[in-house]
Image (cartoon, rainbow, N blue to C red):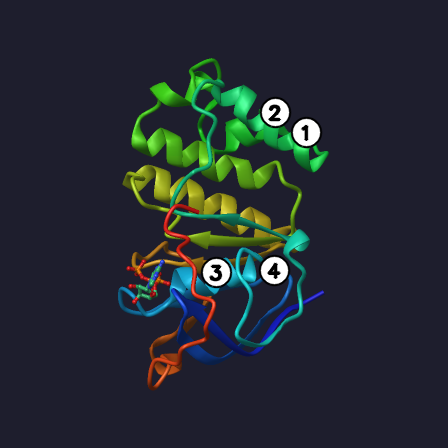
């Protein structure tokens, strides 16, 4: 099953920010979304994840087929690294917690509460969560923020393994992950010409 996005328009705060966005991603493919600050990368990813409705156009994959890693890591502060992953694994009905910790270099930190992790360690845990969702499509918003060089390379390896297993990955990022095989889509050309009020604006700053 491909992810096909056709003629999509997305809005933030009641204004259309991108329009006419079309692309497709096949199993085993990664697509990197680029564009200047504020162009609408996060807004597009939130729309794909089903957190907000599209203004126009269509998305072939239902939100249940993908997992979204936003700027916030969505961690439970009082749970340990291992308990956080067990929590998410239970929700998705899959296992693989031990393997996910190993892949993101978290095994030695398994008993530490999320609240006591460094920023980069929190980010590694947030990304390990992807591995225990069992979802084919990963939608990632600036996944490498706070990661050191070694962790970026580690994560690139995890993404490659997911692609090798037939997964799909969409990544909004300003940095080079070293995924030379990935396709790149510049969202600049899809910037809405004149802001179009969609009505029904809402403040989702903390979501
Ligand atoms: N709650 C809101 N109300 C009104 N406008 C908003 C709101 N949230 C974001 N915006 C605006 O919507 C536009 C798109 O924002 P978005 O976060 O999608 O951009 P981005 O491409 O992800 O940027 P960055 O590279 O800085 O992360 C920006 O101009 C932003 O200022």
Residue 181 in sight in this render:
no
Horizontally, residue 82 falls left or right of residue 152, namely: right
Q: Kindly report the distance in space between the C-alpha atoms of the residues bearing marks 1 and 2.
A: 6 Å
Q: Looking at the rendered structure, which numbered label has been put on residue 90?
A: 1
Q: Which residue is mark 2?
A: 86
**Residue lying at 42% horizontally and 15% vertically, measured from the top left:** 112
Residue 130 in sight in this render:
yes
Q: Kindly report the distance in space between the C-alpha atoms of the residues bearing marks 1 and 4.
A: 26 Å
Q: Is the residue under label 4 in contact with that under label 1 (CB below 8 Å)?
A: no
Q: Kindly report the distance in space between the C-alpha atoms of the residues bearing marks 3 and 4.
A: 19 Å
Q: Secondary structure at mark 3?
A: helix
Q: Is the residue under label 4 in contact with that under label 3 (CB below 8 Å)?
A: no
**In this view, the mark in front (2 or 3):** 3
Q: Which residue is mark 4?
A: 28
Q: Is the residue under label 3 in contact with that under label 2 (CB below 8 Å)?
A: no
Q: Secondary structure at mark 4?
A: loop
Q: Earlier in the sequence, mark 3 or mark 4?
A: 4
Q: Looking at the rendered structure, which numbered label has been put on residue 205?
A: none
**Residue lying at 49% horizontally and 58% vertically, measured from the top left:** 46
Horizontally, residue 46 falls left or right of residue 152, namely: right
Q: Secondary structure at mark 1?
A: helix
> Is residue 138 or residue 92 the one in the foreground?
92
Q: Earlier in the sequence, mark 1 or mark 3?
A: 3
Return the residue found at the far front: 200
**In this view, the mark in front (4 or 2):** 2
> Is residue 109 or residue 103 the one in the foreground?
109
Q: Kindly report the distance in space between the C-alpha atoms of the residues bearing marks 1 and 3.
A: 25 Å
Q: Is the residue under label 2 in contact with that under label 1 (CB below 8 Å)?
A: yes
- What is the quadrant of the N terminus in the image? bottom right
Q: Looking at the rendered structure, which numbered label has been put on residue 45?
A: 3
């Amino acid at each position: 099953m491909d992810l096909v996005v056709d003629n999509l328009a997305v809005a933030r705060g009641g204004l259309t920010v991108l329009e006419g966005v079309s692309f497709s991603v096949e199993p085993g493919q990664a697509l990197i979304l680029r564009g200047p600050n504020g162009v609408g990368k996060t807004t597009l990813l939130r729309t794909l994840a089903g957190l907000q409705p599209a203004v126009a156009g269509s998305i072939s994959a239902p939100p249940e087929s993908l997992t979204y890693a936003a700027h916030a890591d969505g961690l439970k502060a009082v749970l340990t690294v291992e308990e956080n992953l067990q929590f998410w694994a239970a929700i998705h009905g899959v296992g693989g917690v031990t393997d996910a910790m190993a892949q993101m270099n978290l095994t030695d930190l398994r008993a530490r509460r999320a609240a006591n992790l460094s920023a980069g360690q929190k980010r590694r845990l947030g990304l390990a969560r992807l591995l225990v969702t069992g979802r084919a499509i990963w939608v990632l918003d600036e996944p490498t923020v706070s990661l050191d060089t070694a962790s970026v390379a580690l994560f690139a390896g995890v993404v490659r393994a997911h692609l090798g297993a037939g997964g799909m990955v969409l990544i909004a990022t300003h940095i080079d992950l070293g995924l030379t095989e990935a396709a790149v889509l510049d969202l600049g050309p899809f910037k809405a010409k004149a802001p179009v009020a969609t009505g029904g604006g809402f403040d989702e700053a903390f979501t």
